[in-house]
Image: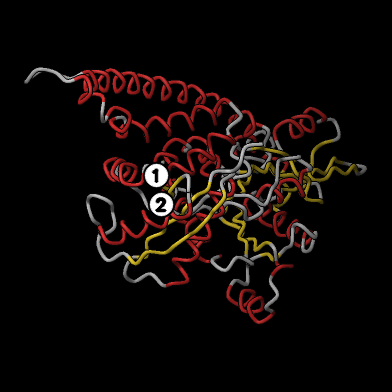
Amino acid sequence: MDEPLKAFLITLQPPGQTDAEALTHLDELKGLVKTLGMQTVEAIVVKHRESHPRLLVGSGKAAEITDRVTDLQADVVVFDDDLSPSQQRNWESDTGLTVIDRQEIILEIFSERAFTREAVLQVALARMQYSLPRLVRSYANLSRQRGGARGNRGGGEMQLEVDRRVILDKIDKLKDELETVRKHRGRTRQKRDKGNVPSASIVGYTNAGKSTLLNVLTDAGVLQEDKLFATLDPTTRRAALGGGVEILLTDTVGFIQKLPHHLVDAFRSTLEEAVHADFLIHVVDCAHPDWDSHRKTTLEVLGSLGAVDKPQLLVFNKIDALTDEVLRRGLEIQYPDAVFVSLHRGTGLEGLKERLSATVRKLHVPRLLRLPLDRGDLVGYLYKNAQVLAERYTDTAIEIEAMIPAQALAAVAAFEVEPKQ
């Protein structure tokens, strides 16, 4: 078995950022590196007052880092902050090692975790967009090696332009393929909508417990691990909430701070599930010391998708790991409409189902209909086009309680007894 790569991690602390915040970013980078199978040999925080064009940090600090990396015999240097293509080349030239940033780490993780056709296409597109400005990294020495007369292009420059055109062509092709997949997803969504079952998307920071929630409510069997980005592909399953109420739940890719914009763009079609859902279930790991920042990051990403104003049910998960009772009581006071659960232990699940059911009923008001006994055709129509909650027969009528979408209401509106709140 190959030894894991030894990684030296660096996060920059700009003015105004607290030590605790910087360490939180560093811990998250450690988690990303671990997810990718690397071993952290050292992780440091560098005070960062201004950006330097050559190496991002000052030459003195860069020399210290290079010496330390050499002493530790590290294999790779990982920056928590974005490196420009030229900065990346300069660091690799100075250290003689592979130097990557947070974007590349996340892209590698996504590449390993992509299984469906859509996810593979999305990751490939993001990687191409990330790699395009870094092509010169591969050919920096080729022109000098092969030379060329004054005014003529060297071999490296010609090869660079050829590869750039190839990548641009691949990007266009990937975008076309993703558009085809997006249209297919839209048709699939329309079919689900015609089933007249309310829908909710499970959103939240990576590793908050979204896949666990889907599994607990639906027995979906989705992979759940204590790792960042354990699952990428959205999974939709039907869940019974009791009282005849059903809901379609979709697990979405987890969010993260400093999410590469290439991935936000590439995964937009996947994240659109959140846009089209009737409401959102926002899962927060309340035992994480930076839970509020995670909550805000999720809201920021939802805002970029145009979904932040959708009805949300806030679910604080992992309360079993929240040992500070004062903090827990404070959360309950601060967020009185939230639900507090431990999905791992099953604590609070019945209360969660009740809140989900109440949310569905609030968005889709049940209606009580009294149909003539000879109108079995309308009973069949309701079962096909609405969500029937109850069916009762009396001596004079068939009473149906159902959640009926607007497009199906006209056919039975004349038999409505009263809107049932």
- Identify the residue at horizontal 82%, vertical 36% (top origin): 372
Left or right for 418, reference 36: right
According to the picture, the residue beneath numbered tag 1 turns out to be: 99
**Proximity of marks 1 and 2: CB atoms separated by less than 8 Å:** yes
Q: Is residue 88 above or below residue 148?
A: below
* SS state under label 1: strand
Q: Is residue 178 visible?
A: yes
Please state if 203 lies on the left or on the right of 329 as rendered. Answer: left
The three-letter code of the residue at mark 1 reads Val
Is residue 210 left or right of 254 when viewed as pictured?
A: right
Query: Dot 2 corresponds to which residue?
Result: 79
Counting from the top left corner in percent of width and height, residue 107 is at: 48, 39
Left or right of 81? Residue 73 is right
Residue lying at 62% horizontally and 51% vertically, measured from the top left: 363
| Of residues 88 and 323, the one drawn nearer to the viewer in this rendering | 88
Quadrant for the C terminus, please.
bottom right
Colour convention: secondary structure
Residue 297, disc = none
Type of amino acid under label 2: Phe
Judging depth in this view, the residue of 332 and 312 nearest the camera is 332
Work out whether mark 1 precedes mark 2 in sequence or the reverse, and give the earlier one: 2
